[in-house]
Structure formats: C-alpha cells, structure tokens
Image (cartoon, rainbow, N blue to C red):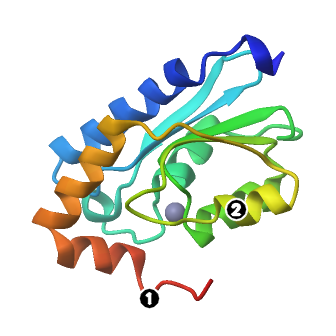
Amino acid sequence: MTRVIDPARLLSVAREEAELGKAEGGVPIGAALFDTTGVLLGRGHNRRVQDGDPSMHAETSAFRNAGRRPHYRDTIMVTTLSPCWYCSGLVRQFGIGRVIIGEAATFEGGHGWLEEHGVEITLLDDPACTALMTEFIRDRPELWFEDIGVPAEN
Ligand SMILES: [Zn+2]
C-alpha cells in the first residue's frame, strides 16, 4: 500500500504545521502521523516556546495527538526536518515503519541511523521546508540552538 501514497501530499500537512508554529513565534518544524494508506492519525508542531516545554518537538506532538494504537509498524511519520536523536528514538521505540522527511540540509538528524535499523526513509529535499529553517536559523539562532541543545557526535 505504501506505493499508492503521495509523499509530497503528506509532507504538505507537516509543512502547514510548521507554518502554524512559525506564525505562533515558535520553532517552525511540523509533523504528521499517517497510516500506510495515507489516512491522517495526528498532526502537530514544535511547541517549545508556546508551551514552555523543551520536549514538545513536532514529531512528539503529532505522535501524542494520534493517541494510542496497538502497534506502529503500519504508520508513517512525516516531518519537515530530519528527526533529532530524541524523535529518532521515538520512531525506534514505537517501531514506526517509515519516515518521510522534508529536508536534512539545515540539520543532519537521525535518518541515516533509522535507515540502518530498517526504517524506510524518504528524503524529499523540499525547498519550502529548507527555506523555513534557513530563515529561522538566520533570524533566531539563539532559539534554534536552545532547541537543539548540544548536538550528539555522529
Ligand atoms: Zn525532535
């Protein structure tokens, strides 16, 4: 069933979330969880600033909004930016089968590590996602580096 979904359409939902986060003055990263037929299960964006919660990353937000499921192998996490170690850990912890990523040019996240562990990775190199983060890192470097913390060695 994975071949019938359109990754760009799924990404547009995550990108809408990133734009919402930007409009709220937050970190402009969005995500959405779908099943493998493309049905939306949950969506969300980084809410570090909005909630005063450094653990509320976009993927976490989408995952929590999707609620409980018996298993996650048949779900797709879609995110505007390659997932950090924390969100990559979430993908591994719950066995999410596939991750669709807007871009990894502004931040080298954990997608290579996920792929090594059998997660199907689709990297779209979406110019709109790259522009959102490039602008944000330029305009709010202190906020970005606060959010990302001290990057792990890779
Ligand atoms: Zn994260």
At which x and y percent is residue 94?
81, 54
Q: Is the residue under label 2 in contact with that under label 1 (CB below 8 Å)?
A: no
Disc 2 residue type? Gly
Q: Is 70 on the left or on the right of 29, as rendered?
A: right
Count of marks, rendered view: 2
Q: Is 114 on the left or on the right of 14, as rendered?
A: right
Q: Quadrant of residue 150?
A: bottom left
At which x and y percent is residue 110?
63, 65
Residue at image x 89%, y 38%? 70
Classify 6 as above or below 63.
above
Classify 145 as above or below 28.
below
At which x and y percent is residue 125?
46, 41
Disc 1 residue type? Val
Q: How busy is the neighbourhood of tag 1: few (under 14 within 10 Å), some, or many (20 plus)?
A: few
Q: Quadrant of residue 153?
A: bottom right
Q: Which residue is mark 2?
A: 112
Q: Is 87 on the left or on the right of 2, as rendered?
A: left
Q: Which residue is mark 1?
A: 150
Residue at image x 22%, y 65%? 137
Quarter of the image where the C terminus is located: bottom right
Q: How busy is the neighbourhood of tag 2: few (under 14 within 10 Å), some, or many (20 plus)?
A: few
Report helix, strand or loop for mark 1: loop
Residue at image x 61%, y 71%? 85
